[in-house]
Amino acid sequence: MSALGGAKPAGGATGIAPVPAVISLVIFVIIFALMYMVGTPLAMTALIGIVIGGLLIGFGVHFVPVGGAPAAMGQAPGIATGVAMLAAGGGLAGLFGGAWAASQGTLVAVVTGAIGGGLMLAITCFFVNFVYIYGMGIPAASGKVKKDPITGDSQVEYKSQGTEGHGLPFVSFTGGVIGGLLGGAGGTLIYLMLLDVYQASLPGIMKATAVQIQPIAVSLAGMFAIGIFLVIAVLAAYNITGTIEGPHDPKFKRFPRALIACAVASALCGVMAILLVMV
Amino acid sequence: MDNIVFSIGITALAGALAAVAGAAENVESDIGSQGDPNSQVQLAPQMGYIHRIYNKAIAGEPPAWGLWIALGAGIAWAFMAMQINPILAIVLGAGLATFVQGVYSTTAYLGRTASLSKFGQPVYIDIIKSMTTVTMAHAFVAIFATVTLCHLMNAALGHPFPLPLLGLVWGIALGAAGSATGNPYYGKERQYQTQNFGAGVPISASGNIVRYAEAGERNSLDNGYFTSKLGGAAAGVCFGLIVFLELWRTVLFEKVGAGWGAIIVGVIIILVFTVIDRYIEVWARKNYGPYTKPTEETAS
């Protein structure tokens, strides 16, 4: 069900359907009510952190320029792989760095994770353009805008005949880096929130010291963080439906409804991950 | 000081292993036709172009490599827990994961090709025999190198994640970097070698992949030979730089400014890559020029 009225951009329906949105809101409230009843204040804080992390990932996926199979033939701009998987590659590389910096405080760890994700995608996006330009002799051109919104470079005449564009114009490169930053930050935040909960709960449950449970806490938090990351990334990829050029793509405007879905999905996954050690 | 020197050495070794892994991953992907370009290999018989190219897109490259490397790392981890020498454990883990890759490859080729029988595409048994083992060999190199670098991160650099989890993280990152870098070179430059150089493949040409070589029909080993010269090397350098720079900034600057040193260095590295990217983008626009005159295009 699409929103009524108004011209539809090339990216398809961007409206939020009211019935699913209300159902999502109800599920969201029920999850938080459940956590309020059975959880501790720490668990509640963790759940809020997980939802924020999920929103960051869901929003970040929309920035990553992914062209899928057409990009592999130079028929469309973007990176020639899947949306969810590329975002996961960048975000998880960020999570790697963030988890390493966990002992230095939440803020430092989250920013470290963000930079790790941004770094991975900056290098990857650069090599995409490197292969297009020096391997295939093809300049970057967007198929969705006449001018690059950041540099002002004209795009239309740089599209080769019979294609929708190719490579990564500067706005797409920037979108990739922003997507990596948000994904890395979101993944790390989810990991840190779960780690706090497990570090507080596991010693009592397993009747062991904090040092003894540390490897289990880290492993559990890491597994759930990766799992939640993939759930959110795939959900956001469904909203994109295949390919997106970056923040200038009309499909980018669809992100609000992805945020609703990502908030509910991350809350649901988060409550399960937390209740594992609460009930 | 010794500790820092040791860590830098491990970082360099991990970067080198990552470069080998990236290159092997990409060549495996091109010989096995694993990534997005396989859409054309699948499409070609439906357009009437029967071919002898391997056809095994098991999944997207990132999840496939996430599986194989997590599997190799998990098995190696279990062997290490049994007090087996780490090198032997990693070799065994990588070997067993490679067999899983081989099983997936065989079933994927048979299943995908059999689904094209209504279009007259035969299942070539000699293709299975000669190509599957080559993809397995490349997969072994990539899995062994990646599991080894994950072990170095965990055992030598002290990353808190256990080996299988590191394997999953870096397996997905390896697949993402390798497919992003290598897919266009295999998909456009090799499969559509007859199309104009320096231009994308027109959508109308979809499915018309190159099927003949200098002598006889082209097969996927020819594709691996071709793509290893640029796509494979670029994927290797890409993944190598990702691993090396991520570890380097952490190892050297983590203690500076209570963690902010590594962050600032990371931002600087991102900016450097942004500037280089912009430079080559402008360089290409100046040197290759537009395909059509701007005035004509805007008038239309």
Image (cartoon, rainbow, N blue to C red):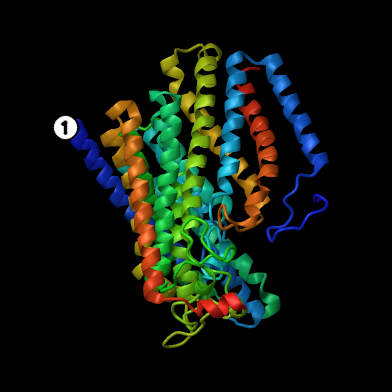
Q: Residue furthest bottom?
A: B215
Q: Identify which residue is drawn at 61% across, 41% down.
A: A232
Above/below status of A150 relative to A55? below
Which quadrant: the C terminus of chain A?
top right
Disc 1 chain ID: B
Q: Position of residue B287 (x, y in %)?
A: 36, 74
The residue depicted at 48 percent of the width and 53 percent of the height is: B176
Q: Is residue A103 left or right of residue A191?
A: left
- In the image: residue B75, left or right of residue B42: left
Q: Nearer the viewer, residue B53 or B232?
A: B232
Of B194 and A142, the residue lying toward us: A142
- Residue B30: where, in percent of width, then height? 46, 67
Which image quadrant is residue B39 in?
A: bottom right
In-front residue for pair B237/A223: B237
Give percent across and percent down for residue B112. 62, 67
Residue B8 appearing in the image: yes
Q: Which residue is mark 1?
A: B2
Relative to A55, say whether B275 is above or below.
Answer: below
Question: Horizontal placement of B49 versus A203: left or right?
Answer: right
Q: Amino acid at mark 1?
A: Asp
Snapshot quadrant of residue A36: top right
Residue at the image position 66 percent from the left and 55 percent from the top = A241
Label 1: which secondary element:
helix
Neighbor class of circle 1 (other Cα within 10 Å; few <14, some 14-19, many 20+) is few
